[in-house]
Amino acid sequence: MANDKLPQAHIYYTINPFKWFRLLRENGVSRSKLGEALKISFFSIISYPIQLLDRVAVLIKSRNLVQDEEPVFIVGHWRSGTTYLHYLMAKDDYFGYLSLFQAFLPNITTIGGKLFKHFFKPLVPGKRPQDNIEVDIDVPAEEENAVSTFAMESASHSFWFPKNEKYFKHYALFEDTSEENFNGWKKSYQRLMTKVAIAFPGRKPLIKNPHNSGRIPQLLKLYPNAKFIHIHRNPLKVLPSTHLMYDKVVTTQFLQDFTEEELHDKIFYYYKSSMTNLLKDIKKIPKQNLYHLKFEDFELNPLSELEAVYKQFGFGHFDKVLPVFQDYVNSKKSYKKNSHRESPISTERILEECAFAFEALNYPMPKTQTMKPNTKLAKAR
């Protein structure tokens, strides 16, 4: 792996200590990660009184809170353009979202305000190391990692404890799970959505989370009239870019040693399982509530594609907010992507194991030399 990873604070630093010690019992940590585990334990314990106060504040503020029951969900695999779409749509103050500050410190931000922002801001790198996208403390962020700090029902636990795929299988794919597990996830997810509503009262939630790609039926149970934007990208671009994301960011959060070969298998397993679920279950979304967006088209014509999204969902104020969108798009014209030409993710393996996605998403399969059968297909964990 690359050795140029940025030092990062761990997402678990303000985790509920009872959840943290349960996770330790279930998973353990590698010897090389003991120092990080001790820091997590320390920060978790000393922040717990603030966490309790924050929880009380959320309960009080949510008493008369009216929440929008038709959120907009951006779904699609990691590195498919979900972030750019999320950032762009969030420029419209019609939407509310979970900010990076809230996502990283979800258990203390309701009462933490400017004080915790002051301490957290220096930890934000300015640009995301996996793709050079500019970030600051208030940009939109995913909610899955935030849920992992106060609930067991989060697929992100399989990120931080990579040897245990139970959390991903139960809460991203909902395989081998019980009604009790679903109810626990539902409660935790709605708790997070309440935080979004408190931060942006009266706004429509705009939620981007690749984990949601595998659990469309569960989201529809919570929000039957939710809107879904499915953004997709050529697998030959997605999988190498996903590896870079892991190498630069996700592996810095690992609490268990993990080999490069195991990492490759994990990447392919997540892609195949989540995309299989998405392609199967997306048909359950009412047509008027679904928009399919090809990243390659969105990249070329973001404003026209976004106008089509607004039209599809009946958001009638596109012309009003167009100048804001135009300014943001113009500000990103000098953006340069990272190169993945030397990615260890082989084209041959992508073509062999992900052929279903090329066909379903209407991407041509490139012509290659005859390949030998792969006897080491990634096994579903």
Image (tube, rainbow, N blue to C red):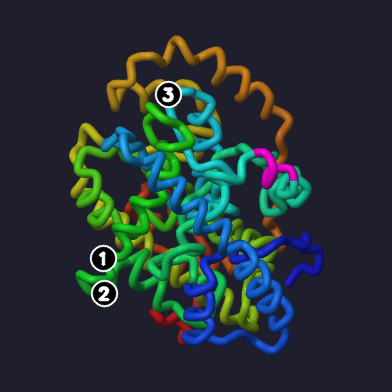
Residue at image point 57% right, 47% down: 109
Q: Residue furthest right?
A: 4
Which residue is identified by label 1? 182
Q: CA distance from mark 3 to mark 2?
A: 36 Å
Q: CA distance from mark 2 to mark 1?
A: 7 Å
Which residue is identified by label 2? 177
Residue at image point 33% right, 66% down: 173
Quadrant of the image for the N terminus?
Answer: bottom right
Q: Amino acid at mark 1?
A: Phe
The answer to whether residue 379 is seen in the rendering is yes
Which tag is nearer the camera, tag 2 or tag 1?
A: 1
The first of marks 3 and 2 along the sequence is 3
Q: Could you say whether the residue bearing mark 3 is in a helix, strand or loop? A: loop
Crowd around label 3: few <14 · some 14–19 · many ≥20 (10 Å): some
The first of marks 3 and 1 along the sequence is 3
Tell me where residue 136 appears, x and y as whole percent.
68, 39
In the rendered structure, are the residues bearing label 2 and label 1 in contact, judged by CB atoms less than 8 Å apart? yes
Residue at image point 61% right, 24% down: 329
Q: Main secondary structure of the magenta part?
A: helix
Residue at image point 20% right, 43% down: 224
Tell me where residue 156 appears, x and y as whole percent.
48, 65
Q: Could you say whether the residue bearing mark 1 is in a helix, strand or loop? A: helix
Viewer-closest of 332 and 196: 196
In this rendering, the answer to whether 127 lies above or below 304 is: below
71 part of magenta stretch: no
Which residue is identified by label 3? 94
Question: In this image, 6 relative to 261: left or right?
Answer: right
